[in-house]
Image (spheres, grey):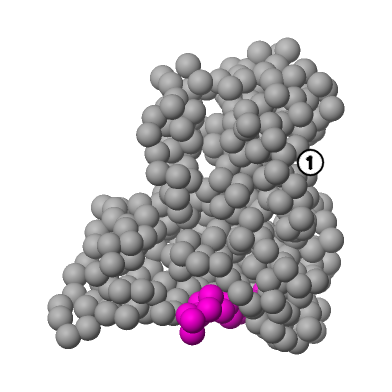
Amino acid sequence: MVEIAVIGAGMRGCEYMSVVKYLHGRQAKATAVCENNPLRLKETAAKFAIAPERCFADEKDFFAAGRLADALLVCTQDRSHYRHAMAGLAAGYKNILVEKPVSPDPEECRRLAAAAKEADARVLVCHVLRYSNYYKKIKEVLDSGELGAVVAISHTENVGYFHFAHSFVRGNWRREDETSPSLLAKCCHDIDLIQWFMGAPCQSVSSLGGLAYFTAANAPQGAADRCLGGCAAKKHCPYDAERLYIKDPFYRATFIKYLGRVLTDSMKSTKASKLKALREGPYGRCVYRCDNDVADHQSVLMDFGSGRTALHTMNAFSRKMYRTTHIMCEKGEITGRDCDTGFRVKIFGGGERKVRTRFIPVTGHLEGDIRLIESYLKLLEGKPYREDYITSIDATVPSHEIIAAAEISRHRGGAKVLLGER
């Protein structure tokens, strides 16, 4: 039985513990947890049957206890990932899985990679898209050579208006100084995909984007500071928190309606507790009157040398969450949306076919989350795996370096920035 310790029992930490419990309960279990929110710690311990002596409210006590399990999952906030992964290595963990991004500072990524090598430890990063069968099949087609070399890639992440408002306007990732730029927080696994598909190092980057819409200047007439504070614009506002988190019927509800624990900290949230949270907490604020400063759209043009380029666009302005991918090769092309059941391969001067990658149309991220844990457990059990399909800390450094360069370029008005330039 593989034992897993988890630091951070928020949404992602509990999601991964649930995947382990309900899909792999015969081979693994969570046996230790660290969480500084008392209610979350208590409920997590109860749900996953973690012994009281293996529950920690303070990270110093957690790491001082030494290696408590076979593997450590780091599921805390962005700017804590590097610190907690390094502390895990110091505590003796030889297998660490870190939520993305690793750090807004690429130098910290490189230090973690060096520390893992020195400790003879395995540090993996949750670039979940690589684990999705949808994207793995795309990689297989590219590696087969039937389309020739990749010439250009156009990849877009449509975040979803409700998702962006939840996470990047009202939520934890709204400010760069507290977490990281939205491109890093939301798209480092997209950039990871692109450099994985290209199979070559990026040489330079140009980027444009910024915060265009979620500002006070765009507030509709009569908008109040809070959705439940007598807002005169509430009826026709797509960002009305009461509707998004509570009132929307099942057939129209977005996934954030089911995030009661995010609002109240409790797994047993009631309608009354959710309403109280919206009246008093961050998720009930008007999206035009928050303290957010991260970009709500951004495009990144990457030069991979020999005339090969890739364009990635992140935007908050889509009705649903999905990614579109167009890979242009010497002898054909690949087109698809990761919310579908597969993608299309089109041969120049020949036919085309659909490559089915799943039976149910779900996003690549959701599928990737499940397959990530499955792959990680196989790795922990010593089963065979393809090194280039595993997102080790070494493999993830390039995506963080590309995004750091993109942020420099964006703040310079789109100027070309060489990789490694500061």
Q: In this view, does 342 lie to the left or right of 318?
A: left
Horizontal and vertical percent position of residue 187: 59, 63
Q: Residue shown at 67%/18% (left/top)? A: 68
Q: Residue shown at 67%/45% (left/top)? A: 113
Placement of 99 over or under 58, stated as above or below: below
Q: Which residue is farthest left?
A: 350
Tell me the quarter of the image containing the C terminus. Answer: bottom right
In the image, 193 versus 12, the foreground residue is 193
Residue 308 visible, this angle? yes
- Residue 239 falls in which quadrant of the image? bottom right
Q: In this view, does 407 lie to the left or right of 121?
A: right
Tag 1 secondary structure? helix
Residue located beneath label 1 in the image: 83
Placement of 87 over or under 52, stated as above or below: below
Horizontal and vertical percent position of residue 411: 78, 80
Placement of 64 over or under 297, stated as above or below: above
Residue 299 shown in magenta = yes
Q: Residue shown at 69%/84% (left/top)? A: 416
Residue 55 visible, this angle? no
**Magenta part of the chain:** 295-310
Q: Which amino acid does label 1 sit on?
A: Arg
Horizontal and vertical percent position of residue 174: 75, 62
- Residue 328 falls in which quadrant of the image? bottom left
- Dot 1 crowding, Cα within 10 Å, few <14, some 14–19, many 20+: some
Q: In this view, does 149 lie to the left or right of 391?
A: left
In the image, 297 versus 142, the foreground residue is 142
Horizontal and vertical percent position of residue 220: 73, 82
Q: Residue shown at 61%/61% (left/top)? A: 398
Number of labels in the image equals 1
